[in-house]
Image (cartoon, rainbow, N blue to C red):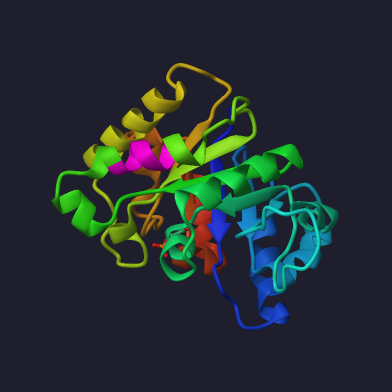
Amino acid sequence: MKNLIVANWKMNPASQKEGKEIFEAIRDGVKGLKEEVVICPPSVYLYASVFGQGIVSMGAQNVYFEDKGAFTGEISCTMLKDLGAEYVIIGHSERRKYFGETDEIINKKIKKALEAGLKVIFCIGETAEERDAGKKNEVLERQIKIGLDGILNLENLNIAYEPVWAIGTGNNCGVVEAKEAISFIKNLVGAVDRSTGPRVLYGGSVKSENSGAYIKEAGANGLLVGGASLNAEEFVKIVKSAE
Ligand code: 13P
């Protein structure tokens, strides 16, 4: 099972031109490495997946759970597939916080994406308040239970543990704490000692200085990288640190 290193560009960069430059520098930099690398740009740049050329895969940051119809502003799984997207991020904490996504909505999205043949990066993680109140495991368990309700085939599923307090703060989760959470998640989904997944990734203020430890010490099967993935040189270093 390869490590999965995912770039989540969020609502960046500001132009297609800049996106293409970052994309090409990453593609050239990771050529020949054995990790699986996925770039998730804003969906309007996904058409550019034609330049993935098999070295990196493309993913979306969100999708809707209906097939088609009167859902202004939304994009379906089949549309993403048609553009060449192989992966989709679902349940990111920014979607939960700013766009009101509940565990139930996330469950519908994951079901639909898997049915459509997309590979899913399902994000979970506790807020600072939940952590301080000692509720971390309870929150992770609820997010997994509802998020994966009724889903039996976990083959195309990846889970990203992203503690909300570690996202975009520079305050990355300590390796011991990350290891505990990753083991807890693997136990819940029966991924312990299985070579087929689901892979459990770590995300939250990942940089090249801390990235290798999540794979080598905390037992993560990959990384979900935000800010640092917009700097091609830094992102390539992160991918190399997982080798
Ligand atoms: P940062 O790497 O910028 O903390 O973002 C993490 C994240 O939200 C990736 O999905």
Q: How many marks?
A: 0
Q: Main secondary structure of the magenta part?
A: helix
Q: Which residues are magenta?
A: 139-144
The residue located at (64%, 40%) in the rendering is 111
Quadrant occupied by the N terminus: top right
For residue 180, what is the image quadrant?
top left
Tell me: residue 75, above or below residue 155. below
Query: In screen coordinates, is 178 left or right of 76?
Result: left
Residue 207 visible in the current orientation: yes
Q: Between 73 and 180, which is closer to the camera in this rendering? A: 73
* Residue appearing at x 58%, y 53% in the figure: 89
Q: Residue furthest top?
A: 193
Residue appearing at x 33%, y 35% in the figure: 218
Q: Which residue of the protein is positioned furthest toward the front in this rendering?
A: 70
Please state the horizontal and vertical placement of residue 47, each as a whole percent of the image: 80, 66
Instruction: Point out residue 6 in the picture as x, y percentages from the top left corner.
Output: 56, 51
Q: Nearer the viewer, residue 188 or 168?
A: 188
> Which x, y percent locates residue 187?
37, 23
> Compared with residue 177, is residue 132 higher up or lower down, i.e. above or below?
below
Q: Residue at x 42, y 20 (%)?
A: 192
Which quadrant contains ligand 1? bottom left
Whether residue 243 appears in this view of the structure is no
The x, y position of residue 87, in whole percent, is 67, 48
Above-or-below relation of 179 to 165: above
Most extreme residue toward the left is 133
Q: Is residue 82 left or right of residue 213?
A: right
Is residue 210 in the magenta section?
A: no
